Image: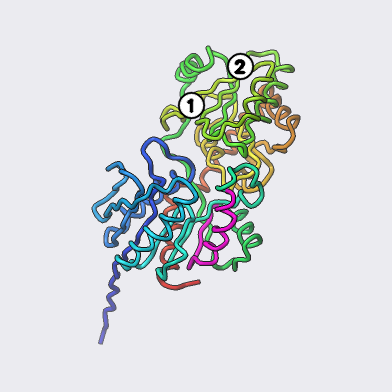
Amino acid sequence: MQFTIIFYLVPVKIVVNTRLLIKDKLEGIGWFTYESLRRITRDHPQDHFIFVFDREFEEDFIFSDNITPVILSPQARHPFLYYLWFEFSVTHLLKDLKPDLFLSPDGYLSLRTDTKQLGVIHDINFRHHPEDLPFMERKYYNYFFPKYAHKATRLATVSAFSKNDIVNEFGITPSKIDIVYDGVNELFGPVASLEREAIKGKYTNGADYFVFVGALHPRKNISRLMQAFDGFKDMYSGSAKLVIVGEKMWWTPEIENNYNALKFKGDVVFTGRLSQEELSRVIASSIAMVYVTYFEGFGIPILEGFQCETAVITSNLTAMPEVAGDSALLVDPFSVESIKGAMLLLAKDEPLRKALIEKGKIRKQKFSWNKTAALLWESVEKTVNGNR
């Protein structure tokens, strides 16, 4: 006698913190949230996702029919409001809905709920460089995030570096943390020579340029990057420029003073935020991506450089060597001379630049948002099913 075994998928109800899904203002964690959830919700139509926003949301973020959007007050944009939102508004919602899981892609959790929780802690820079944050932010992060890490049923993070950092700093068991690497936008890619010339004409009056992408935050090392570029210009006979893409969200008096002291500040071009399509063209038309921040849990712009088939200069610290492998020039981000030397090398050595681009084409295959979504869903299943 033959028996047929039928497995029934039991639908799950997942409440998701989507407060960083803000139209035209997606940063690193926002992109992680957008790209992974866009895939997960569509790939699991039998499950119910409740997206929790702290403001009016765009319909573009409701990716599929199995999503129910909810708006909770107050807007969580300040440490005191973080506390109110997660400890009261979110906690009450979880009590009412009784979901199988609360998923928080930015790592904030509720300490006052018994609901299973999966937090994604991308990095703990605040632990190592508290001086880079406003007083109340750093106090909040250093007090609450160790508690979140211990409260979580499971954790995910975006690199082995970050996993080890969380283990060592917060005393978390390694088996409780899953590595879910970031991906890169599939729209990014190389451009033809005519388009490259058009982009250079638009932003640098036809000059070659290095490009930096990221929020202009102190940890992004903008001051040393600009100083290195100034030194590069003193030693380079060409008309190269530095294009800085990103919002001046954390522009400090120190950065302002360093900028004003530059000999070649007229060759530093600030574009502000660009659309993803335009950003792709700007990266692809550059001499190299120069991403020399001194602390990252991952470093998505490294992959963007690889995807756009441009050379990459990045830091030899934290997660950046893990992401770049041997496909980028690694420099000491605290050394202006080290950054300057790499810029000079890539400006003058075309064979090296082409070799790095070829390596980048191979290296980028290790990462994709499809892989991110699959890994995050594995972590979700472990959390729901109680595998710790």
Viewer-proximal residue among 141 and 65: 141
Q: Is residue 67 above or below residue 100?
A: above
Are the residues at dot 1 and dot 2 in contact (C-beta closer than 8 Å)?
no
Q: Which residues are magenta?
A: 138-158
Q: Hey, what amino acid is under mark 2?
A: Asp
For disc 2, the marked residue is 267
Q: Residue at x 55, y 26 (%)?
A: 244
Q: Amino acid at mark 1?
A: Gly
**In what element is the residue under mark 1?**
strand
Binning the other alpha carbons within 10 Å of mark 2 as few (below 14), some (14 to 19) or many (20 upward) gives some
Q: Which residue is painted at 38% across and 41% down in the image?
A: 22
What's the residue at 53%, 12% (across, down)?
205
Which residue is at a point 63% across and 57% down the rendered structure image? 165
Estimate the spatial distance between the alpha carbons at disc 1 and disc 2, rounded to whole Å: 16 Å
**Which is the main secondary structure of the residues drawn in magenta?**
helix
| Residue 258 forms part of the magenta stretch | no
Q: Which residue is mark 1?
A: 272
User: What is the total number of numbered labels drawn onto the structure image?
Assistant: 2
Q: Is residue 58 above or below residue 213?
A: below
